[in-house]
Amino acid sequence: MRSTTLLALLAVVLLYLVSGALVFQALEQPHEQQAQGELGEVREKFLRAHPCVSDQDLGLFIKEVADALGGGANPDTNSTSNSSHSAWDLGSAFFFSGTIITTIGYGNAALRTDAGRLFCIFYALVGIPLFGILLAGVGDRLGSSLRRGIGHIEAIFLRWHVPPGLVRILSAVLFLLLGCLLFVLTPTFVFCYVEGWSKLEAIYFVVVTLTTVGFGDYVAGASPNQNSAAYQPLVWFWILLGLAYFASVLTTIGNWLRVVSRRTRAEMGGLTAQAASWTGTVTARVTQRVGPTAPPPPEKERPPLPPPPCPAQPASRPLSPAAPEKTEPPSPPTPPTPPTASALDYPSENLAFIDESSDTQSERGCALPRAPRGSRRPLNTPRKPARPRGPGRPRDKGVPA
């Protein structure tokens, strides 16, 4: 991820946090002030009704009660009652261990001993990775089962000649609705009936639990009226299946986004190539109509050297009197004319090299310099036809064989 993208994402997250903080402050701070005022009124009323109790003693008593409630004590249970409810019976302890390895951590029950805290450290370090492996396996099986069931429904839609794109959308929506029905709506009504919560409180507990937030203000099975030892273990198995379902949903969304990203990159690459080709074609056509202002310099080529003077002819080879040899100064090389071919010409037409045959050089009587390799031959310069070679070619008179 690029640094600019990372900084932009960090800014978005910080802005999201600040906006959430402002909303929660506006919603919850007035309720907190109201609760604090009510507590002060109750305290003053108690002191007026019991003048023998000092304000300092009452404050110490309230603090001890708060610490006891934080340690898991139940205010409805006293030493004279025969209630056998405990926050650390086998079912509650099993549920507490499950909240450790699932990283939910409601906080309604906390460890108060040093030995328990030390054991919790090693227990979490081993249990959290183990639960992650189990969650991945259960999510894979659960997602495969749901997709298999939805596949039969897709086959029915295809028999009805529904377009495949619409069938995929309907299957995705059906997958989400089926999971929400099994792991969100059904537990909501169960908790409303068993715990006595309202529908808002029940769905709040479900969402907070399956997102592993776990505030602890609402916990299933924490009420002293719940005496079933198997209730909280069943709640933990529901948490396992719900987390596996949400993990499969997140995996499906991640795969879909990956496929969309690949298709987008491929389409953008094709559009970029088409835009580059179109730009090159338009530029070549405009250049052909207007004409270049100056011929482009050759790429990585040295300027051609002037042709060397013709060497003296040997005495044994007489020249023809009809064609006397004239020595002319070498003419400076002329710059190549720019090609006038259209933009749609084949590339091989512009890659011809200047090649002088040995017969033409012998006719001129001197060796001409060869064109540097890689230089292009002007299109408007016609190529001289080569003389026929072989035994049928007549030789010049006076030239020894």
Image (cartoon, helix red, strand yellow):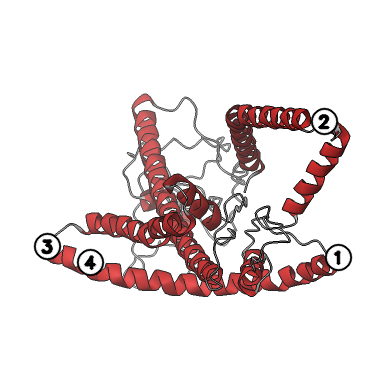
| Amino acid at dot 4 | Ile
Mark nearer the N terminus (2 vs 4): 2
Mark nearer the N terminus (1 vs 4): 1
Mark nearer the N terminus (4 vs 3): 4
The residue carrying mark 3 is 160
Relative height, residue 393 to residue 363 (above, below): below
Q: Measure the C-alpha gap from mark 1 to mark 2.
A: 41 Å
In contact (CB < 8 Å): disc 1 and disc 3: no
Residue 65 place in picture, x, y as percent: 77, 48
Can you tell which of label 4 and label 3 is closer to the viewer?
Answer: 4
Q: Measure the C-alpha gap from mark 3 to mark 2.
A: 83 Å
Asked whether, in this view, residue 132 is left or right of residue 175, the answer is right
Mark nearer the N terminus (1 vs 2): 2
Look at 31% across and 43% down and name the residue there.
344
The residue carrying mark 2 is 51
Can you tell which of label 3 and label 2 is closer to the viewer?
Answer: 2
In contact (CB < 8 Å): disc 1 and disc 2: no
Mark nearer the N terminus (1 vs 3): 1
At numbered mark 1, what does the secondary structure look like: helix, strand or loop? helix
Q: Residue 303: name its quadrant.
A: top right
At numbered mark 4, what does the secondary structure look like: helix, strand or loop? helix
The residue carrying mark 1 is 114
Q: Measure the C-alpha gap from mark 4 to mark 3.
A: 11 Å
Can you tell which of label 1 and label 3 is closer to the viewer?
Answer: 1
Residue 198 place in picture, x, y as percent: 44, 47
Residue 330 place in picture, x, y as percent: 57, 38
| Amino acid at dot 2 | Pro
**Badge 2 density bin: few <14, some 14–19, many ≥20, Cα 10 Å:** few
Mark nearer the N terminus (3 vs 2): 2
| Amino acid at dot 1 | Asp
In contact (CB < 8 Å): disc 2 and disc 4: no
Residue 367 place in picture, x, y as percent: 55, 54
